[in-house]
Image (tube, rainbow, N blue to C red):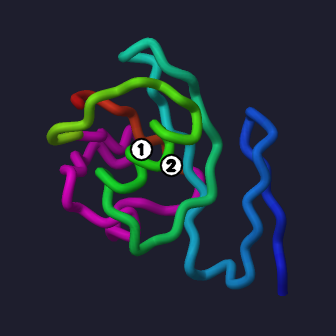
Amino acid sequence: STIIISDQKGQVIKMTNQSNYVQITLDLSRLGGPLLDLAVPRQLTVKRLLHEVNQSYQLGYELLSPICRNLEYETVLFATDRIGNRSVRDGVTLQLEQL
């Protein structure tokens, strides 16, 4: 089955296998950025996700060693952690804390 999802900016993401993706909210507000609802491949690392978002939205962030906090589970994800981490489930909010 094919699912089509768009983020708040209207960019369309086409998914063919729902189980390979997790739907998250990425909160960049602590660094003056937007709040984004995204469908993200589970195998992506935090750094790669933020690199893609940085380029797509032309945010101008310099990503060194990004850290995100999973607000629902109060866990921290580091640059090399995969989005498919056991604490990242559909509907969670990941808040960028450090570039």
Question: x, y percentage for residue 54?
Answer: 45, 37
- In the rendered image, residue 46, in percent from the top left (x then y), is placed at 32, 53
Of labels 1 and 2, the one closer to you: 2
Residue 61 position (above or below residue 16): above
Residue located 54% across and 61% down the image: 40
Residue placed most toward the observer, 16 or 92: 16
- What residue sits 17% from the left and 38% below the top? 64
Question: The N terminus lies in which quarter of the figure?
Answer: bottom right
**Residue lying at 34% horizontally and 70% vertically, measured from the top left:** 86
- Distance in Å between CA atoms under marks 1 and 2: 6 Å
The reply to whether dot 1 and dot 2 touch (C-beta < 8 Å) is yes
Q: Nearer the viewer, residue 53 or 7?
A: 53
Q: Upstream in the sequence, badge 1 or badge 2?
A: 1
- Residue 91 vertical placement versus 27 (above, below): below
- 83 lies left or right of 55: left
**Which residue lies at the image location 39% right of the left edge and 44% below the top edge?**
50
Which residue is denoted by mark 2 in the rendering? 92
Above or below residue 18? Residue 72 is: above
Can residue 92 be found in the magenta stretch? no
Describe the element under mark 1 as helix, strand or loop: loop
Magenta residues span 67-91
Identified by mark 2, the residue type is Val
Name the kind of residue labelled 1 in the image: Glu
Whole-percent x and y of residue 90? 57, 60
Q: Which mark is residue 72?
A: 1
